[in-house]
Amino acid sequence: MQNGHVPLSRIDDANRRILTKKFELGLFERPYTDRSWTPTVGSVSHRALARQAVRESQVLLKNTGSVLPLARADNKIFVAGRNADNIGNQSGGWTISWQGSSGNITPGTTILQGIRAAVGPTTTVTYNQRGTGIDGSYRAAIAVVGETPYAEGQGDRTGSMSLDREDLRTIATLRNAGVPVIVVLVSGRPMDIATELPRWDALLASWLPGTEGAGVADVLFGAAPTGKLPMTWMNSVSQQPINAGDGQVPLFAQGYGLTY
């Protein structure tokens, strides 16, 4: 405003609309939450709604040979990756603490637990974080990789936006077994994956699903993906910032998303 780029009338207009809505909502008369509802936080109905939100926000970006959805019965699946069984990682920052943290920090269902609960008794699910023990007898491998928790400041990545060495080694171990590899990417933003993507059979952008990892499993095992990219996905970090209509060729366009 001080340099004249934004007129005071524009700021007044924005403030007027904000204040109008606050008056309509009664926030000046009732500025605090109704604490009588506090015991219901995290209830069964809340978790069911959260699971629905997870399920509907998954974005299927690649699905070669229709490897997804996976069969619930008579199947043999290997699960790997540091984000597969880590509720702190899948919840991200602003969870319990400002920056969040890895580990069992809050009640909920990890993605691995969701996968185990989704399959029938005739399906085998084997888990090893690094992929150790996989062989060609498995029908598919799921690598749950991506970012670890962060918030502003500590989450700034001014250089590489690629997967780290641990994630890449895990995926390579799964690929070397000769089975289809499904990458479930847990991240708070698009990552630099274009060079790796051709070697993956499927890619599911799971974002930060929070406490209800079963919502990710819902899509892996048959719930039709409905999510679409809310932003343009870069071909490489050198393209940042990248936006629809800026003339750059993205890896995936804003609004992209496959279904079954």
Image (cartoon, grey):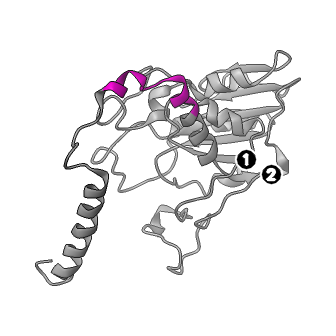
**Prevailing SS of the magenta stretch:** helix
Q: Is residue 219 above or below residue 211?
A: below
Helix, strand or loop at mark 1: strand
Q: Residue at x 33, y 51 (%)?
A: 156
**Of the residues under marks 2 and 1, which one precedes in the sequence?**
2
In the rendered structure, the answer to whether residue 132 lies left or right of residue 160 reads right
Q: Position of residue 250 (x, y in %)?
A: 58, 69
The circle drawn on residue 64 is 2
Q: Residue at x 58, y 31 (%)?
A: 48
Is residue 42 located in the magenta-colored stretch of the structure?
Answer: yes
The circle drawn on residue 202 is 1
Q: Quadrant of residue 186?
A: top right
In this rendering, the count of numbered labels is 2
Label 2: few (<14), some (14–19) or many (≥20) C-alpha neighbours in 10 Å: few
Q: Quadrant of residue 132?
A: top right
Q: Position of residue 227 (x, y in %)?
A: 63, 53
Q: Position of residue 109 (x, y in %)?
A: 56, 24
Magenta span covers which residues? Answer: 36-48
Contact between labelled residues 1 and 2, with CB atoms less than 8 Å apart: yes
- The quadrant of the picture occupied by the N terminus is bottom left
In the rendered structure, the answer to whether residue 198 lies left or right of residue 165 reads right
In the rendered structure, the answer to whether residue 39 lies left or right of residue 78 reads left
